[in-house]
Image (cartoon, helix red, strand yellow):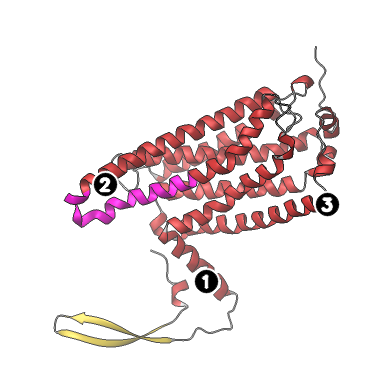
Amino acid sequence: MNECYYDKRMDFFYNRSNTDTADEWTGTKLVIVLCVGTFFCLFIFFSNSLVIAAVIKNRKFHFPFYYLLANLAAADFFAGIAYVFLMFNTGPVSKTLTVNRWFLRQGLLDTSLTASLTNLLVIAVERHMSIMRMRTHSNLTKKRVTLLILFIWAIAIFMGAVPTLGWNCLCDISACSSLAPIYSRSYLIFWTVSNLVAFFIMVVVYLRIYMYVKRKTNVLSPHTSGSISRRRTPMKLMKTVMTVLGAFVVCWTPGLVVLLLDGLNCTQCGVQHVKRWFLLLALLNSVMNPIIYSYKDEDMYRTMKKMICCCFQDKNPDRRPSRIPSTILSRSDTGSQYKEDSISPGTVCNKNSS
């Protein structure tokens, strides 16, 4: 019967895997990684909170697609928490961690990735349901969307906890990987292959939907001149989702490939030298998503901009907004007349988004 090592600290496993965590995370490299990581995490917290608040505030976003988009922002926010926890428990500190604390560190990262990936899969289903009927939004009720969101997080938490539940190498030390010293190589292979396959499936599905919408739009455009804008709306949402998916695949694929090579026990691949940079690339994905939302969706951009302006105005309560007279042209049946109205910059903040 194999001996189990639940009571060992991580230095025991790092030494067996020949992973030098002290020399690789010192000096200038450590400062750069921590500074960049801290900046990214602060931006992740702020920007993704802004996206969630925008969906809640603006009634135009009270549809299944935007609820799922807000949940994706919540997954990115959770990823920021996971990276903060990682920064305080990495480098030389890694060897001093207990097995349970190391499982928590990696479980948070795995949960954030799974939440984002599963959310994108659900968005793909929602887009398929709506776009194949040439509708802007699907007929999913709020109750069903809420259940889907709960399902996403249940799957994410379960996948993050799988190694803790038993699929590890604590009782089979010869099966331990190099990058994750208490993860079984078989688990790394399963986890990375399943994620890469999910990437491929989503890319194929979104390309198929994109081609379908483009073909339908070209066919209907000559005959639906009065509703071209309405017909183009599903295509705009599809472009937003495809951009998010593309960024997700680009940022996460290198890290997953490195983990796969480690799972295959590739000793000549030099996976130790690139792990920290691919981790920062994965972190960059959570930074990019809010930028993509605001760049691709004009309503989202205006709502986020309005909330930021209101925050700055609230910080200066003593400063009274100047009343700017503006001349507005109004038309009536008897003719045209001009009337002056006083518009205050503060009214933008006080007005509810419609």
Q: Residues within 10 Å of mark 3 (few under 14, many from 20)?
A: few
Please tell me which of labels 2 and 1 falls first in the chain.
Answer: 2
Which residue is labeled 1 in the image?
A: 310
Image position, residue 335 (x, y; %) = 16, 84
Q: Is residue 167 visible?
A: no
Asked if marks 3 and 2 touch (Cβ < 8 Å), the reply is: no
In the displayed structure, would residue 108 be above or below residue 297? above
N-terminal-most mark, 3 or 2: 3
Q: Is residue 147 visible?
A: yes
Residue 153 versus residue 307 in the image, above or below: above
Q: Nearer the viewer, residue 21 or 59?
A: 21
Q: Nearer the viewer, mark 3 or mark 1?
A: 3
**Local crowd at mark 1 within 10 Å, few (<14), some, or many (≥20)?**
some
> Mark 2 falls on what kind of element?
helix
Name the image quarter holding residue 112. top right
Q: Is residue 265 left or right of residue 69?
A: right
* Quarter of the figure with the C terminus: bottom left
In magenta stretch: residue 210: no
Q: Quadrant of the N terminus?
A: top right
- Residue 11 vs residue 143, the one in the foreground: 11
> From mark 2 to mark 1, how far is it between C-alphas?
39 Å
User: What number of labels is visible?
Assistant: 3
Question: Is residue 228 covered in magenta?
Answer: yes
Is residue 1 toward the left or the right of residue 241 in the image?
A: right
Q: Which residue range is magenta in the image?
A: 221-245
Picture residue at 48% right of the left edge, 59% below the top:
54
Which amino acid is tagged 1? Answer: Cys
The furthest residue to the top: 1
The residue that mark 3 highlights is 27
Badge 2 density bin: few <14, some 14–19, many ≥20, Cα 10 Å: some
Q: Residue at x 44, y 59 (%)?
A: 300
Task: Please state the horizontal and vertical placement of residue 125, each as a whole percent of the image.
Answer: 41, 37
